[in-house]
Image: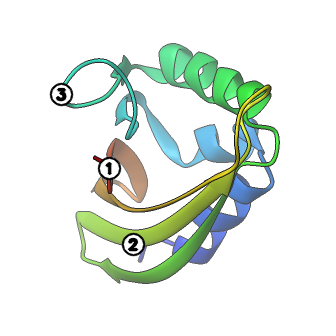
């Protein structure tokens, strides 16, 4: 069963946290492209990932991801995207990046996100 990138993008853009979590394993590791550590933030397990997603959706209510291209393999997927949004009380952003997904039994076991940084 090939991973459904269109459905992945749809649930993220709909801010459908239940739909996002349905695509992930219970022991998922999510490293978003932001945070204080060199790898960004790190959420481990469904509970932490859900809390991180809910916070992100509240803090950037118009957050959107548009796929530029993707590659799907049996146990990995790579999705290049451009993301836009306006944090509450902040300025609008547009950033290019990529997700590297590790897949297990058709679900996301790890999602590591990387983005271009403005220096």
Q: Which mark is residue 38?
A: 3
Nearest to the observer: residue 68 or residue 106: 68
Residue 40 falls left or right of residue 14: left
Q: CA distance from mark 1 to mark 2?
A: 15 Å
Number of the front mark, 3 or 1:
1
Crowd tier of the residue under label 2, counting other residues whose Cα lies within 10 Å: few below 14, some 14–19, many 20 or above: many
In which quadrant of the rendered image does the N terminus lie?
bottom left
| Residue matched to label 2 | 80
Label located before the other in sequence (1 or 2): 2
Q: Residue at x 65, y 29 (%)?
A: 56
x and y percentages locating residue 34 in the rendered image: 40, 33
Residue 20 falls left or right of residue 89: left
| Residue matched to label 1 | 117
Q: CA distance from mark 3 to mark 1?
A: 12 Å
Q: Secondary structure under badge 1?
A: loop
Nearest to the observer: residue 39 or residue 85: 85
Residue 111 falls left or right of residue 11: left
Crowd tier of the residue under label 1, counting other residues whose Cα lies within 10 Å: few below 14, some 14–19, many 20 or above: few
Label located before the other in sequence (2 or 3): 3
Q: Residue at x 79, y 25 (%)?
A: 89
Q: Secondary structure under badge 2?
A: strand
């Amino acid at each position: 069963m090939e991973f459904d990138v269109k459905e992945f993008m749809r649930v993220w853009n709909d801010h459908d946290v239940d739909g996002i979590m349905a695509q992930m394993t219970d022991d998922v590791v999510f490293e978003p492209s932001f945070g204080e550590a060199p790898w960004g933030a790190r959420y481990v397990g469904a509970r932490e990932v859900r809390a991180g997603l809910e916070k992100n959706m509240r803090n950037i209510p118009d957050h959107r991801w548009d796929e530029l291209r993707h590659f799907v393999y049996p146990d990995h997927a790579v999705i290049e995207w451009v993301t836009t949004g306006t944090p509450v009380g902040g300025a609008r952003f547009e950033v290019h990046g990529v997700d590297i997904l590790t897949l297990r039994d058709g679900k996301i076991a790890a999602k590591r996100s990387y983005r271009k940084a403005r220096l």
